[in-house]
Image (cartoon, grey):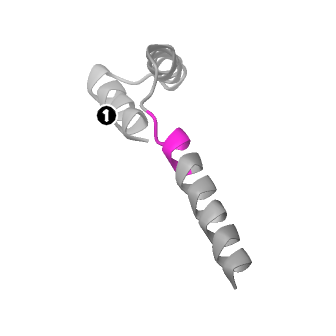
Amino acid sequence: MKNILQKSIYVFLFLLIGMNALAQKSTPKHIQKIHDKTEEMATVMDLNEDQKAKILEIKLMC
């Protein structure tokens, strides 16, 4: 019984640490990449500034 509880605690801690690592803020390099991709999309799709701003907002939320 003690062994199962101990393993459960280890699994819980591992998952908690893993979720924390995935939830970190975007780096400036990543944000710049999002801006670059949005500019490329705007050029290919011939978007106006308002449309480009909306796409950028959506992509930054994800």
Residue 20 included in the magenta stretch of the image: yes
Residue 46 included in the magenta stretch of the image: no
Secondary structure of the residue carrying tag 1 is: helix
What residue range appears in magenta?
19-24
Q: Position of residue 60 (x, y in %)?
A: 39, 33
Residue at the far bottom in the pictured view: 1
Whether 59 is drawn above or below 11: the answer is above
Figure disc tally = 1
| Residue 4 picture quarter | bottom right
Q: Quadrant of the C terminus?
A: top left
Q: Position of residue 23 (x, y in %)?
A: 47, 42
Task: Judge from the rendering whether residue 19 lies leftward or rightward of residue 31; answer left or right.
Answer: right
Q: Position of residue 57 (x, y in %)?
A: 32, 33
Q: Nearer the viewer, residue 44 or 2?
A: 2
Task: Judge from the rendering whether residue 28 lies leftward or rightward of residue 22; answer left or right.
Answer: left
Whether 58 is drawn above or below 1: the answer is above
- Residue, x 31% and y 34% (percent of image)? 54
- Residue, x 55% and y 48% (percent of image)? 17
Q: Quadrant of the N terminus?
A: bottom right
Q: Nearer the viewer, residue 35 or 21?
A: 21
Q: Position of residue 59 (x, y in %)?
A: 43, 35
Whether 13 is drawn above or below 17: the answer is below
Q: What kind of secondary structure does the magenta stretch mostly adopt?
A: helix
Q: Nearer the viewer, residue 2 or 14?
A: 2
Q: Which three-letter amino acid code belongs to the residue tagged 1?
A: Lys
The residue tagged 1 is 54
